Image (cartoon, rainbow, N blue to C red):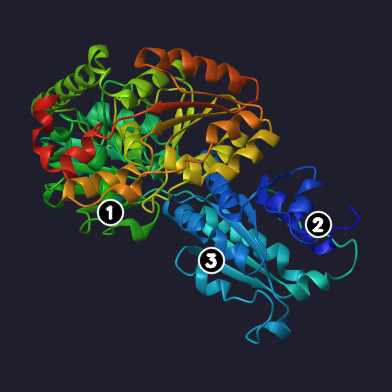
Amino acid sequence: MSGVPATWRRAADALAEAGCETVFALPTDEPGLLDAADIHPELRAVAVRAHRTAACMATGHAQVTGRPAVLALGAGPPFGDAVTALVEADSVCAPVIVVTTRVPAAGIGRGGFQDIDQAALAAAFTRTYLRVTDAGSLAWALRRAVHMALNGRPGVSVVEVAHEAVETPGPDGARPPSYGGPVRRLRSVPDDDALRRGAALLAGAERPLLLLGGGARAAGAGPAALALAERWGAPVMTTAAGRGSVPEDHPLVCGSVGLYATPPLETVQCGADTLLAVGTRLEETARLGWDSLDSLRLVQIDGDPEAFGAGVAEPTAALLGDAALSLAPLTALLGERTEQRAAWLRSALLARRRAWLGWTADGDLAGSPARAALAALAEVFPDAATVHDNGANDIWSYHWPVHRVGPRGCTVVPGEQTMLGFGLAAATGVALAVKDRPTVVVCGDGAAEMGLDALPTAAELGIGLVLLVLDDQGYGWPRLLRREAGAPTGLTRFARPLPVDDVVRALGGSAETPDSVAAIPLALLRARRCAEAGRIALVRVKVPEDDVPPGIRRLFLASGHDMGDER
């Protein structure tokens, strides 16, 4: 342990006891927290090529584990470089602990090297910002940061360690106080009056709908949600972040809402008269195309009081509590489903059947390589942890049943910020945590280029990522909107694409571009075998510019009004 300052060794001890497992960071000039984690028996150190990438890795890791991931940063530019990804971490409620340093006190405000007001930069996305000027308070601050990151609305906590605290660590050999084990997430249930009020509103529904968000998935609320839906007689839909909370092959599950509603399933969201929303703030993408949302009777369950009235007006009944724990007592208060609700459910399931037949028909896939690739992905990778990015064609992957999350799969998505380049880096963090299944990234060629610096780290760690790249030769989303408006599109095309395939091969992986839709399944099967051997595999699918996902066509393009008749 020689060469690693005692302050950082004690920080590693405190983080391990608090329940953290992995530290992501760029190596610093002098040994720091990353080095302390590298020699700690209970921590894993992951060295990266860029701070932004490290923050995405920590976010992906925290999303799938539900436990805090640690990001170590230096003062100044490293902190600024990570901000974009940390804003994304906040938007998806990922518990991330940022441990950063501060310049010597004598340089603050006086032109000190790399002096910057990090607290001001962090104000928009942090749950708490703690400053440590004395090494004696470091263990308390780190544990407090973990508690704040996990509880209430999970998110980002920052601990800023002063230069003086590192240089004057206190008596050598001193260990941080023991707190008796990991920090736990605190869980509660709504009071009896709130539950009775909520149940009464649900009982009066004629056309009920159950909506599950990211909070429901994080809480493991799926089984309780399906039990309530079956008793209530309600179809189940999700937000993008809520996918994976329930198996999407369950007969009550009708895909996602808003931008990601697949025709004719938008009729289910728009036809409901009562909504039970669990673990969602009803962000903008969930509300798109849902004009009746403001007029619904809304019962909302959330562990964060700030969620009520955030996306829409204040709910008719607000139930403050854990998503999983709150559903069981609510179900117990419900009566049996009525015949009227049974008729509504039959109509919703008919729409589900129409969606399934209309969007999975083999004969209709030849004109949509993106859909064909996602259909093959469902067959070859039914157990995958699928990580999504931001783009035009990869929005296909948000639409059920074009892409499906089965009982053995899970999905990770960016949040409202929808940061371009999130996927590759986040997938590396996901794969470190999810070892019993493959990890697949679905992204466009622009996002693949932006996340390229994550690949050497994945290769060094022996992580067998699979990259499904939907290639439209540039930035398809702005090109689509510009073309619709009659604006120039030339700048949205890549004149000199980066040789991503060559990079993958240079790292010991495989890369191929199927020459037809029929060749995609075998290419994905070969990619799976490559990944199972611990190597990166890339499958590039060329997609046409007019292959537009239904949510975009329905809500953003003038031709969208015809979409329901086309499928």
Q: Nearer the viewer, residue 300 or 29?
A: 29
Residue at 44% across / 32% down in the picture?
A: 469
Q: Which residue lies under the disc numbered 1?
A: 318
Q: Which residue lies under the disc numbered 2?
A: 9
> In which quadrant of the rendered view does residue 144 lie?
bottom right
Q: Nearer the viewer, residue 395 or 557?
A: 557
In the rendered image, the residue lying farthest to the front is 495
Q: Which residue lies under the disc numbered 3?
A: 128
Residue 213 seen in this snapshot? yes
**Looking at the figure, which quarter contains the C terminus?**
top left
Residue at 23% across / 35% down in the picture?
A: 334
Q: Earlier in the sequence, mark 1 or mark 3?
A: 3
Q: Is residue 526 above or below residue 189?
A: above
Specify the amino acid type for callout 2.
Answer: Arg
Q: Secondary structure at mark 2?
A: helix
Alpha carbon separation for disc pair 1 and 2 = 45 Å
Q: Nearer the viewer, residue 536 or 354?
A: 536
> In which quadrant of the rendered view does residue 274 lie?
top left
Alpha carbon separation for disc pair 1 and 3 = 26 Å
Specify the amino acid type for callout 3.
Answer: Thr
Where is residue 153? Give x, y as percent: 44, 55
The answer to whether the residues at label 1 and label 2 have Cβ atoms under 8 Å apart is no
Residue at 40% across / 52% down in the picture?
A: 303
